Image: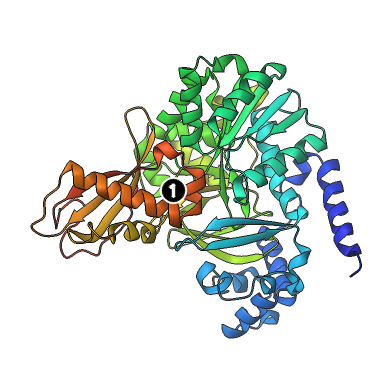
């Protein structure tokens, strides 16, 4: 087999474009109408991806008839269940050629079976733009020596390797940035920070919010002087409160909430879809004290993750309170429904609504640091109805069910339960599970321990994300045994939901 010249040319072209193009030109760089761009991607994918071509045939869709954004919006949605799991992995790639992708990442499914995500270098560079936006706009890493400490789990899981790759691209572009990858090894992270951070103007920790808090608290207990290292945080995978952000800011010595933090909205399916900006953080901080305004914007008073996104990189739509997107990847995705509860708000509409309630971007962001890029907003509550996110791991009801089906437990529980991820008084994240007792059965500390041990064992066995993302000391859930028909968790005559947002 000969070397693939087209593959080499595709890589060189993508690298040259990213390394030689200023950030301002990379964001929204295609110009025109994002919907037209998504339509063009659809036409190309319908011609080149065998699985998608068959999917359209089965749905009775003739690609040549889809010629307008309105027609595009009528296309059937794809999902893991109806698309990704129905076709051969190679057929999900262009030309049915899996070898055109150079990297595979893994995420856990609801049964513990892995889902494989393929990408090529050019896909990674798309996501590197999101990292560049954070590192430049928020952290001014173009003018500061920066140590990036990747605290996501390393290995086949998507977060760690993707993050390390994108940060290295920033360094290759000319940013004075050095990357180190201790993964989610807390002892190694603290060793790295102590020994290397003094050589840099700032240190960026990248990881899941509850794990980063564990690292910061462990460091404080060991005498680490976080303020001297000028810590910045990049987070993903969890919705957190503004009180949590303020607490962490206090513990790391941050005096600039808007520019020292950035949360990413990412997914194994397609990398980073959007990111917090100084403006979106200012808005969220404003809304934290005004739940009635939050309800006007988001339909609920609780705060979602609020990010801005580039509609030419990831074209979002919302349907019935959930999000779907279209984007190019090793496995291209057209109107992909990820079941995340949330919505979209245009840039002008967001600022207009907020101005009516006294918020001004110009006064919220200092003039010398004003970075209010006119990008649309996406808000995300999470994957309600299906999973709870804990330390970045998706906790599936199916995994917990197995724990309750163990001998010695199944005899005195009904099998119903409710999973929540909640913060304790110290803002530490805990996995809390309410379990319904069978009629006539009673709770005891011994029974609660038995259930907690069984669930932890099965989660660790069945869910590779849980086993690798969640620190060992945080894996045991807090179990409450409640009487049958408990009105708060197990009301009689109501369809049961196995997850609940905190």
Q: Is residue 182 left or right of residue 461?
A: right
The colour scheme used here is rainbow
Q: Say which of 322 and 211 sits in front.
A: 211
Q: Point out the residue furthest to the front here.
A: 407
Quarter of the figure with the N terminus: bottom right
Tell me: residue 275, above or below residue 225: below
Residue holding disc 1: 389
- Position in image of residue 445 (x %, y %): 19, 41
Residue 81, given in percent of the width and then of the height, sits at 50, 70
Please provide percent x and percent y for residue 3: 90, 64
Residue sitting at x 36%, y 58%: 397
Residue 131 falls in image quadrant:
top right
* Residue 273 seen in the current view: no
Describe residue 306's horizontal placement relative to residue 195 as left or right. left
Asked if 36 appears above or below 480 in the picture, the reply is below
Q: Does residue 43 appear in this view?
A: yes
Along the viewing direction, whichever of 47 and 428 lies nearer the viewer = 428
Q: Quadrant of the C terminus?
A: top left
Q: Is residue 285 left or right of residue 58?
A: left
* Whole-percent x, y for residue 500 in the image: 32, 51
Label 1: element kind: strand
Viewer-closest of 215 and 382 = 215
Q: Is residue 294 above or below residue 68?
A: above
Q: Within the image, what quadrant is residue 333 found in?
A: bottom right
Q: Residues within 10 Å of mark 1 (few under 14, many from 20)?
A: many
Q: Residue at x 74, y 76 (%)?
A: 47
């Amino acid at each position: 087999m000969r070397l693939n010249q087209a593959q080499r040319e595709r890589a060189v072209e993508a690298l040259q474009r990213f390394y030689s193009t200023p950030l301002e030109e990379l964001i929204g760089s295609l110009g025109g109408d994002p919907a037209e761009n998504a339509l063009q991607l659809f036409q190309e994918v319908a011609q080149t991806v065998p699985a998608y071509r068959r999917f359209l045939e089965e749905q009775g869709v003739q690609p040549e008839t889809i010629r307008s954004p309105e027609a595009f919006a009528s296309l059937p949605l794809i999902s893991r269940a109806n698309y990704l799991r129905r076709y051969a992995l190679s057929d999900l790639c262009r030309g049915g050629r899996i070898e055109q992708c150079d990297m595979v990442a893994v995420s856990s499914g609801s049964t513990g079976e892995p889902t494989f995500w393929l990408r090529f270098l050019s896909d990674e560079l798309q996501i590197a733009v999101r990292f560049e936006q954070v590192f430049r706009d928020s952290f001014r890493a173009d003018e500061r020596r920066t140590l990036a400490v990747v605290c996501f789990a390393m290995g086949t899981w998507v977060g760690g390797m993707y993050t390390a790759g994108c940060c290295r691209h920033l360094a290759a572009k000319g940013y004075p940035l050095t990357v180190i990858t201790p993964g989610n090894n807390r002892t190694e992270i603290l060793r790295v920070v102590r020994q290397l951070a003094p050589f840099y103007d700032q240190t960026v920790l990248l990881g899941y919010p509850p794990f980063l808090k564990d690292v910061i608290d462990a460091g404080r207990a060991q005498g680490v002087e976080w303020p001297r290292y000028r810590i910045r945080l990049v987070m993903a995978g969890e919705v957190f409160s503004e009180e949590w952000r303020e607490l962490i800011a206090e513990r790391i010595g941050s005096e600039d909430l808007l520019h020292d933090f950035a949360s990413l909205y990412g997914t194994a399916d397609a990398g980073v879809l959007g990111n917090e900006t100084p403006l979106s953080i200012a808005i969220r901080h404003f809304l934290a004290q005004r739940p009635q305004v939050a309800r006007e914007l988001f339909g609920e008073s609780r705060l979602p993750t609020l990010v801005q996104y580039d509609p030419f990189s990831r074209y979002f739509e919302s349907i019935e309170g959930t999000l779907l997107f279209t984007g190019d990847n090793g496995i291209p995705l057209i109107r992909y429904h990820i079941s995340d509860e949330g919505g979209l708000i245009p840039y002008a509409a967001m600022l207009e609504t907020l101005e009516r309630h006294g918020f001004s971007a110009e006064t919220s962001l200092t003039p010398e640091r004003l970075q209010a890029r006119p990008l649309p907003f996406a808000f995300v509550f999470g994957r309600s109805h299906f999973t709870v996110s804990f330390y970045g791991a998706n906790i599936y009801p199916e995994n917990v069910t197995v724990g309750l089906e163990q001998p010695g437990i199944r005899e005195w529980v009904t099998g119903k339960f409710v999973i929540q991820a909640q913060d304790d008084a110290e803002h530490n994240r805990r996995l809390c599970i309410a379990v319904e007792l069978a009629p006539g059965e009673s709770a005891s500390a011994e029974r609660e321990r038995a259930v907690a041990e069984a669930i932890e064992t099965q989660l660790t066995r069945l869910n590779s994300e849980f086993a690798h993302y969640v620190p060992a000391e945080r894996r045991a859930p807090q179990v409450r045994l409640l009487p049958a028909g408990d009105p708060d968790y197990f009301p009689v005559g109501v369809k049961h939901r196995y997850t609940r947002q905190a």
